[in-house]
Image (spheres, rainbow, N blue to C red):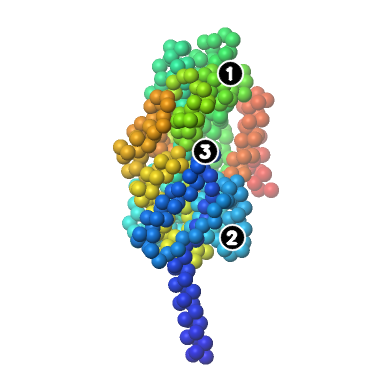
């Protein structure tokens, strides 16, 4: 019996040591933001080289060639097979469901031990990785929504470009002026991707209850937001104000993710789009003291079944808190660093200006303000499903022109569907 105990202990010791020498990572190829990226693994490989300098004995493995659209299924299979990677990249849309299933380790003890301050990150980016008051993931890269504008078209209608702190009322006034200043309806105020959710954020409406995730559409703030969207649609007499119309110079405003904006305003993509007008950008409109900027956040989390959680934490810490790696994220992936210290660095301005064809006026100061304006979306398991149902019903009511009379019924139907 003692020999068996000693043999078992020896095996466990050797097996544990082997796990500590290997770190597995789950990542996907291509950009998180659907923009051209010819260097899919450049940041990860750069981080691995830096990691090896401090941890030469740890071998890092990742499976290449997994497309982003296939990643969730791939990860689900790994979880079922009990082969979950130690460290997992987590897109914004997948976090709630995976967190609710217990897929991630709580990072609080790791952060406390290494004195990782919450203030080191942009607040909305850090909160993207929180669930049930636990920090389950750290932010890696963000893609805030900007409001871009056709500066040339605004000048044509004698409109000054709006200030940073513009309100939804001011936004509507400018859209209305552009739409009604041309009798042939050749020009429009804003593209169709300024949606009802953006308007809700602009007025600071909470259309999901924070406690139980129930839908609430009939508050004063929500009704004012719906009125904004209805007024824009009625003015423009069409839903089909596309980004292609903006590219042709016929639309004043268009919400656009930072990664898409940086791509569209740089060589060679700007040339191929044949834009013959000046661009400018600012933050999304919002009432005073309201955070109104939607921000997608890609995160990293440690699997709850990680065989090498210590190694996973060390590499995650490098990816998400190291300024050199975060600078590489901005250079390569076209999104935004999650660290204010990186965004506000003078070198970042050079990154933003690289290959830029058209003067677009995106300064690090403006980007910092936009990141600080980030909205934190609710955290409950079926958030994505409920959001999709809600969006479908609201869009149909807007197209039918009867949203006001349908609001209570939509609220009731979505809430009841979750209890059935």
Q: Is residue 78 above or below residue 333?
A: below
- Nearer the viewer's eye, disc 3 or disc 2? 3
Which residue shows up at 46% across the image and 12% down it?
156
Q: Which residue is mark 3?
A: 36
Which residue shows up at 57% across the image and 34% down it?
217
Q: Residues within 10 Å of mark 1 (few under 14, many from 20)?
A: many
Which structural element holds mark 3?
loop
Q: Is residue 129 above or below residue 306?
A: above
- CA separation, marks 3 and 1? 32 Å
- Nearer the viewer's eye, disc 1 or disc 2? 2
Residue 260 visible to an observer of this rendering: yes
- Nearer the viewer's eye, disc 3 or disc 1? 3
Could you tell whether 196 is left or right of 417 in the image? left
Could you tell whether 268 is left or right of 101 in the image? left
Q: Work out whether mark 3 precedes mark 2 in sequence or the reverse, and give the earlier one.
A: 3
Q: Residues within 10 Å of mark 2 (few under 14, many from 20)?
A: some
* Residue 291 place in picture, x, y as percent: 43, 35
Report the residue that reaches farthest toward the top. Answer: 183
Give the numbered dot on residue 79.
2
Which structural element holds mark 1?
helix
Q: Which residue is mark 1?
A: 236
* Residue 313 place in picture, x, y as percent: 42, 59
Residue 97 or 83: which is nearer the viewer?
83
* Residue 260 place in picture, x, y as percent: 49, 34
- CA separation, marks 3 and 2? 30 Å
């Amino acid at each position: 019996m003692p020999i068996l105990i000693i043999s078992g202990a020896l095996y466990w010791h050797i097996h544990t040591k082997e796990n500590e020498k290997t770190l597995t990572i789950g990542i996907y190829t291509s950009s998180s933001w659907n923009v051209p990226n010819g260097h899919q693994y450049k940041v990860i490989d750069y981080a691995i080289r830096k990691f090896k300098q401090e941890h030469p004995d740890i071998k890092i493995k990742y499976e290449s060639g997994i497309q982003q659209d296939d990643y969730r299924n791939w990860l689900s299979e790994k979880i079922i097979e009990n082969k979950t990677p130690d460290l997992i990249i987590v897109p914004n849309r997948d976090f709630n469901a995976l967190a609710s299933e217990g897929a991630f380790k709580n990072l609080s003890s790791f952060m406390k031990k290494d004195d990782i301050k919450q203030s080191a990150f942009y607040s909305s980016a850090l909160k993207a990785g929180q669930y049930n008051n636990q920090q389950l993931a750290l932010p890696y890269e963000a893609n805030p929504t900007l409001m871009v504008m056709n500066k040339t078209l605004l000048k044509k209608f004698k409109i000054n470009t709006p200030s940073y702190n513009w309100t939804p009322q001011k936004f509507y006034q400018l859209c209305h002026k552009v739409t009604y200043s041309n009798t042939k309806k050749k020009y429009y105020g804003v593209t169709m991707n300024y949606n009802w959710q953006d308007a809700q954020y602009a007025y600071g409406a909470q259309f999901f209850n924070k406690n139980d995730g129930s839908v609430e559409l009939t508050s004063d703030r929500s009704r004012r937001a719906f009125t904004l969207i209805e007024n824009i649609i009625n003015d423009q007499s069409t839903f089909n104000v596309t980004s292609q119309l903006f590219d042709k110079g016929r639309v004043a405003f268009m919400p656009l993710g930072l990664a898409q904006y940086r791509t569209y305003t740089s060589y060679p993509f700007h040339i191929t789009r044949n834009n013959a007008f000046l661009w400018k950008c600012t933050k999304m409109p919002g009432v005073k003291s309201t955070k109104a900027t939607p921000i997608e956040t890609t995160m990293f989390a440690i699997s709850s079944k990680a065989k090498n959680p210590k190694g996973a934490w060390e590499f995650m810490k490098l990816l998400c808190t190291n300024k050199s790696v975060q600078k590489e994220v901005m250079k390569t992936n076209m999104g935004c660093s999650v660290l204010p210290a990186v965004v506000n660095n003078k070198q970042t301005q050079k990154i933003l200006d690289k290959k830029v064809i058209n003067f677009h006026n995106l300064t690090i100061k403006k980007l910092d303000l936009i990141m600080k304006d980030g909205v934190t979306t609710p955290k409950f398991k079926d958030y994505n499903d409920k959001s999709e149902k809600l969006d479908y019903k609201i869009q149909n009511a807007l197209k039918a022109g009867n949203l006001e009379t349908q609001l209570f019924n939509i609220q009731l139907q979505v809430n009841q569907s979750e209890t059935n």
